[in-house]
Image (spheres, rainbow, N blue to C red):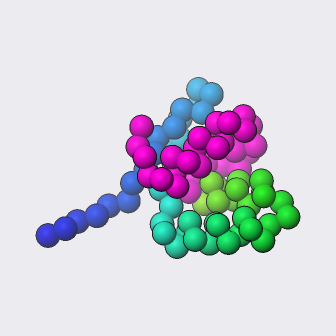
Amino acid sequence: MLKFKKSVQEIDLYGEKFEVRFPTVGELDSFGESMTKSDNEFKTLSGFLSALGLPEDKAKSMELGHLKDLIEVLSTQKKS
């Protein structure tokens, strides 16, 4: 039997620990569509991360490079 369970990425964000789950294929598709239609990309991005488990205020406190790294890890399902 092939068994799947949801994957999470543990992150240490400036000393605070969070578990952020990996998005589903449908969530990634919707996120991509929302980003192309959005006139406020950060709000779309922070809402996406919030749905995955990272509070919006924490996303707002991140350096841009760190935010991009997190999105890359979550969208390519690389586990560190």
Where does the image place residue 23, in percent across and percent down from the top left?
50, 61
Is 58 rendered above or below residue 75?
above
Magenta-drawn stretch contains 12? no
Where does the image place residue 6, in percent across and percent down from the top left?
38, 59
* Quadrant for the N terminus in the image: bottom left
> Which image quadrant for residue 7?
bottom left
Is 41 rendered above or below residue 9?
below
Task: Give, as a single range, the part of the protein colored magenta.
Answer: 52-80
Compared across the picture, whether 4 is left or right of 20 comes to left
Compared across the picture, whether 10 is left or right of 36 comes to left
Residue at x-position 58% and y-position 71%: 29
Is 40 rendered above or below residue 58?
below
> Which image quadrant for residue 35?
bottom right
Where does the image place residue 54, in percent across and percent down from the top left?
61, 48
Q: Work out whether residue 46 can be spotted.
A: yes
Residue, far right: 39
Residue toward you, 9 or 57: 9
Q: Is the magenta stretch mostly helix, strand or loop?
A: helix
* Quadrant for the C terminus in the image: top left
Residue toward you, 69 or 6: 69
Magenta-drawn stretch contains 60? yes
Is 8 rendered above or below residue 6?
above
Where does the image place residue 30, in percent across and percent down from the top left?
62, 72
